[in-house]
Amino acid sequence: METSGFPTTTDRFKIDMVSNVKRGGDEYSLVHIPATRIPNPFETCEAVRDTRIKTFAAYKVDVPRSWTNSEGDHIELDLMSEFQISCRASDLDKIFLEEHEHRLLTIEWDVNSATFEAELDALHFFTEEKRLQNRGPTLKSQRAFRMIQNFHSSWKDFYDLHKDFPQLSNPELRRHAVPDAILRRFKAFNNDHSNAFNGLKQIPNGLYFVNGCPGSGKTEWNMILAGLIQCSKRRHKRRRNPILFLVDINKAVDDAASRYYSLCQEAGVTIRIVRMHGWPLEMRQSAKLHGSRSTTNQDSFSVPDFTNRFLMTAGLSKQTSVSRDPGIVPTLDQASWEYFEKNKRDAFLGLQKLLDKMDSGEALSTDDWKHLRSHVSRLYRVVLARTDFIATTPVAAYGRFSKFFKPDIIFMDEASHARELTTLIPLAYFTPKAWIFTGDVKQTQPFVKDAKDREKHSGLRFNPFAAQLRMSTMARADHVNAVNSKLLVNKRAFGNLHRLPSAMFYESQMRSGYDEASRYPDGVAYLTIYLQNLNGNRHVDENRIIVNLENSNEEKHRDSYWNPLHHQWVLAQATHLLQDDRFRGLRDREMGGTIMIATPYSTAVKQYHAAVKSWPESWQRRTQVLTVDKAQGNEADVVFLDMVRTTTAGFMDDPKRLNVAITRARQAEVILMRRTMAYVPGKRFGRSKYLSQLWDDTLLHKRIVTI
């Protein structure tokens, strides 16, 4: 698993339990069981005393309840109870993991199939001739597809969102009743934000691209626009304009959903928000779960089967007394279960009867399972029809989801991170009033595996299209000057931290959102003194230094690296700051400051994670440990960037990766880097392109600390 990673949330795979289960003289094997990784339901439970439970990966396992015994009889069995370590989760403080209770299993995991199929199906949806005219993409989608092939094509239809949503033209009018929390943020827009907002009056073919630098408020701009659309009133009624918010990074989806949820709560508006982790497999793929071998109703094959996930959510709800944290966005399954609980006696009596039958231990017939699927499908349809805002990934939104949820607006955040084929998914299956793409082409690009020498042994072949696949639709739009608006005001960075990345990556166009007098508030000025002490009391003209530990050496572990001396030094400095009461958060002076430890290599991250887990809980809450590739979208008051390598630049000489790395800090940045990363010894032309600029600029301003 070291080279291929580990199943992430929503990944589907199959598991085999190594041990068999004996019941009534018969032996049953649990093999090829469909499973999906889900968020750990105990992660936020404060009552859990055995904290290991919070850190483990959690899986939803679809285990049959109907089995055939040795005599050929169909019987109802709960085989998973054999592996249960607690009868109920009502007493969370009494659950402890015992070594003798562990079970061995194997995972069979196709790491590419879902994304690969979704992307190619979206492409074929556009390119293959359809037998029925209404089975293909709409005219608006077709024009958007043609436009991304030639951004400057002459044929364009223009759409005006200010006309569709009159409150956008003047949100301050009392008749629109825009909540103060949203109106206050709208009034705080800078000129770049306002220009992007006004550009919504003329959207070519419904496609709108907003490119923004680090800290420019791209996601915030999306949130305010969504809030203006959904939170205003007309004739004393709340408008209902569904929104689909897509990001192809699961962590970013979680953050966006929580952020919008908090905004709506602050605004005092009830918006039904759902975080959808994945769309269910179709019934033909899950029929074996309930022992049905065939069906005469071929139309049912096209109906997604929500049953497995619903039963899993129902089981968790019945087995635990812990209710869902109201401050956390519900998943689609949680929202459906909660709606069912409120309306089961009136609208879902048939479903309730079948669940009661299952709870009594009675085996369901084939017809019962068909009725159960039908009832659950209707429940999910009802919930989706009344949902206002769904946050998910493009792959989860692929296919028949568009038949259940029809958004007026689609946001594609971090669009520069998405492959062009991924971008086709919302274009192919949905026809909103506008597709709004936001991101930064200077920071991220799509991830595409290619066959490096060390990977050829695993069967990975050379991909001749890798370079093409690494260019996103948004990057192509930027390349031909087809981006509609740019956000170039950095409001994250204080202490002049914006200057160097602006010069290196943004042609010096990225500017600070603060005047010179405002760039050093008390907390930032205190960290300037901290950096000057590290720098031998030399003046520091911006809050970025490089620490050159001359005796440090990289160590290789499999295909990754870490640097023990860097590791020790960073941990010592981080704990020093975390104990310092004068190290305060920039956004809330009452809170202690936050720290990010970022590094390019997974082995270094694992070493830092292991050390941080031994810290007090209060310190852990203030500390993030991330690879540089996962740092996009995250920030902290102080960032320690451990470059690890001591003999070569490694892969940190990539401009996008380096841009992400040196734009995460709000108040101060400390880079651990050896000169050999900038100037490789023994090579005639051993000067790295971007790391040498970083080194030379810091050297010029006398901010390199050699220890």
Image: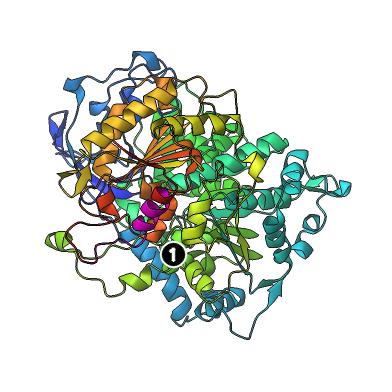
In which quadrant of the rendered view does residue 546 lie?
top left
Q: x, y (%) of residue 591?
A: 55, 24
Residue located farthest toward the bottom when viewing the structure as drawn: 154
Q: Is residue 269 left or right of residue 332?
A: right
Residue 407, quarter of picture: bottom right
Count up the numbered dots.
1
- In the picture, measured across the screen, residue 359 lies left or right of residue 483, that is left
Q: Residues within 10 Å of mark 1 (few under 14, many from 20)?
A: many
Whether residue 126 is situated above or below residue 188 in the rendered picture: below
Q: Position of residue 547 (x, y in %)?
A: 34, 40
Residue 692 forms part of the magenta stretch: yes
Circle 1 — which element?
helix
The quadrant holding residue 87 is: top left
- Position of residue 509 measured from the top left corner of the image (x, y, whole percent): 58, 61
Q: Residue at x 54, y 74 (%)?
A: 137
Q: Which residue occupies the foreground of this view, 559 or 22? A: 559
Most foreground residue, 438 or 188: 188
Magenta-colored stretch includes residue 543: no
Q: Is residue 328 above or below residue 511?
A: above
In this picture, residue 644 sits left or right of residue 382: left
Q: Which residues are magenta?
A: 685-698
Q: Is residue 154 visible?
A: yes
Check the image and tell me how it is coloured. Answer: rainbow
Residue 360 visible in this rendered orientation of the protein: no
Residue position for label 1: 422
x, y percentage for residue 105? 18, 38
Which amino acid type corresponds to the residue marked 1 in the rendered image? Answer: Thr
Q: Is residue 201 above or below residue 24?
A: below
Between 321 and 242, the one nearer to me in the picture: 242
Q: Quadrant of the C terminus?
A: top left
